[in-house]
Image (cartoon, helix red, strand yellow):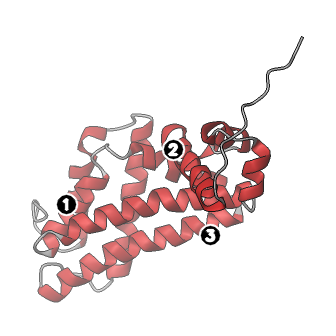
Amino acid sequence: MSTPTRPRAARKSPDERTRDIVGAARELALEEGLAAVTLRAVAARAGVAPALVAHYVPSMESLIASTFATVVGAEIAEVEALVSTLDGPRAQLGTLIRTVLDGSRDDVTVVWVEAWALGRRNETLALAVREQMDAWQTVLQGVIETGVRSGDFETTDASGVAWQVLGMIDGLNAQALVRWGDTAHRGELTLHAVEGLLGLPRGGLG
């Protein structure tokens, strides 16, 4: 009995082939999670042989790390762009918190949660995770510092508050993946806690 053979992949330039592989890895991560980004799965999604994927990426560890950075970096850029269109730090911080806790980004949350776990044994990924968490903290801290300067917020530790807010967001989003707790009101719960951290009355963030 003859063995079916894989159709030969169409000829493409190295840049095109790399984009295909990177795109396939990103799609897999968003659809099935970061753990689904394996050599065979990426090859199948890109329509090439596993050996070709291995030829174009330095290692699967680096591909997983860069895939993570691409996915969450896009989210940060999107939220930052949204916040920049709003007038005033209260509106900016309130909208940021509601946006990342509204349940529409659970695919990205899965990528985050798996990255924290996989990063224990993949230092390249762990470095990417730390960099993206720093990027999120920078965005939050920037909004908070603007609010302190304008008199909207009261705190002497904008960095610490940003770190706490990030922890609340990450924890509630992770819990929501298994539908634990009051997932429908996670944004509201977080807003009330942040209002307390910043010296605002209840409802101060809208």
**In the displayed structure, does residue 186 sit left or right of residue 37?**
left
Q: Looking at numbered disc 3 in the image, what kind of residue is underneath it?
A: Leu
**In the displayed structure, does residue 4 sit left or right of residue 36?**
right
Whether residue 78 can be seen here: yes
Q: Which residue is disc 1 drawn over?
A: 95
In the image, which is nearer the foreground, mark 3 or mark 2? Answer: 2
User: Pointer 3 and pointer 2: residues touching (CB < 8 Å)?
Assistant: no
Q: What residue sits 26% from the left and 59% below the top?
A: 97
Locate residue 14: give its quadrant: bottom right
Q: Does 169 appear above or below 142? A: above
Secondary structure type for disc 1 = helix
User: Pointer 2 and pointer 1: residues touching (CB < 8 Å)?
Assistant: no
Q: Which residue lies furthest to the top in this view?
A: 1
Q: Residue 36: where, in percent of width, then height?
A: 62, 40
- Distance of mark 3 from mark 2, alpha carbons? 22 Å
Q: Which residue lies furthest to the bottom in this view?
A: 149
Q: Which residue is disc 2 drawn over?
A: 27
Whether residue 121 can be seen here: no
Q: What residue sits 59% from the left and 61% below the top?
A: 66
Q: Does 34 appear above or below 128? A: above
Q: Looking at numbered disc 1 in the image, what kind of residue is underneath it?
A: Thr
Q: Residue 206: where, in percent of width, then height?
A: 10, 60
Whichever of callouts 3 and 2 sits on the residue coming sooner in the sequence is: 2
Secondary structure type for disc 3 = helix
Whichever of callouts 3 and 1 sits on the residue coming sooner in the sequence is: 1
Q: Does 199 appear above or below 187? A: below
In the image, which is nearer the foreground, mark 2 or mark 1? Answer: 2
| Relative depth, front residue between 112 and 180 | 112
Label for residue 16?
none
Q: Residue 39: where, in percent of width, then height?
A: 72, 44
Q: Which residue is disc 3 drawn over?
A: 127
Secondary structure type for disc 2 = helix
